[in-house]
Amino acid sequence: MTQTLPQTTRPPMTLTIAGSEATGGAGAQADLKTFQELGSFGMIALTCIVSFDPKDDWNHRFVPVEPQVIADQIEAIFGDYDAEALDTVKLGMMGTPTTISTVSEALAARRPRHVVLDPVLICKGQEPGHALDTDNALKSELLPQATFVTPNHFEAEQLSGITVRSLEDLTAAAHEIHRISGAAVLAKGGVRLEGPDAVDVFVDGDGAEVLRSPKIGEHAVSGAGCSLAAAVAAELSKGATPLEAARRAKEFVTAGIRQRVAGGTPFDALWQGGLRG
Ligand code: PXL
């Protein structure tokens, strides 16, 4: 007979539906570490496995997880915790149109309160036709279910149809993505916009706010996008408003970039423990 212990207070909970990036800089690994750092109980439904290839310029080797196995993981997670306990889901790399349909159906059946979409559009190592189909599926099936979207510079251009060269362009793109999706938008200029600051733009139904922090180097750090969206999700799971979540996530990522981890890859990895000091 199993012993039933008295119910303790449950921590906030966040599920990521994302891919594995083995070196631990990006993907589901970055998400889970971010959830833990910010005090949200993390869960993963894995969509694919990415292995950088040191013999081929660190290009991505990509293996999708079977659709049924993705559906099984989501079933296990929502069987374990009901939608009231688990009301926040983060979506990372999907990788194939079939995966997107599987995840879209699973979400539509459960309708979590917060769906944070990191619209990872193209993964190196996928052929262009396939990548375009995946991008289109993401726009038509997942974007409408998102409550919060975190496009980077390239993704903001693709989703909005606006070329982004300035803060004004980024702001226009964020407004357009908010208009088509209804979601709160945190559009990231990162190191891609000129100037001394890494500038992001937050837009929701209540207005817009520019978030700034001094740039740390001129190179993008692996895992920054994943960690930012994961931090937004963790903060929402704790009851933050979308704007509070965006501000806190920016602080988390800035601290993690400041203490980034260098290795053999041509890019450094964000350290999710950056805010510990
Ligand atoms: O940073 C985007 C990203 C997301 N998810 C996985 C990845 C990457 C980039 O490498 O591998 C699994």
Image: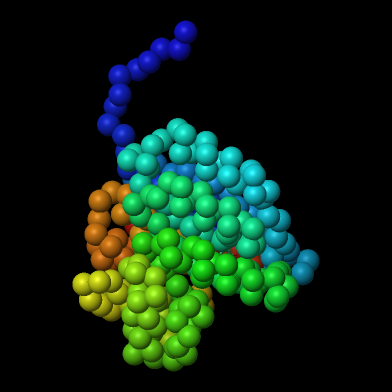
Q: Position of residue 136 (x, y in %)?
A: 57, 72
Quadrant of the rendered structure where residue 230 is? bottom left
Q: Residue at x 48, y 38 (%)?
A: 77
Please tell me which residue lies in front, 175 or 182.
182
As displayed, is residue 256 above or below residue 89?
Answer: below
Give the colour scheme of this rendering.
Answer: rainbow
The answer to which quarter of the image holds residue 166 is: bottom left
Which x, y percent locates residue 137?
Answer: 57, 67
- Numbered circles on residues, count: 0
Q: Quadrant of residue 180?
A: bottom left
Is residue 73 among what the camera can see? Answer: yes
Which residue occupies 54% across, 67% down? Answer: 138
The quarter of the rendered structure image containing the C terminus is bottom left
Is 195 rendered above or below residue 85? below
Q: Position of residue 105 (x, y in %)?
A: 52, 52
Q: Residue at x 70, y 76 (%)?
A: 128
Left or right, 68 with respect to 10, comes to right
- Single out the residue that lies furthest toward the left: 206
Q: Is residue 131 left or right of residue 196?
A: right
Left or right of 136 in this view: 218: left
What is the residue that sits farthest to the right in this orientation?
55
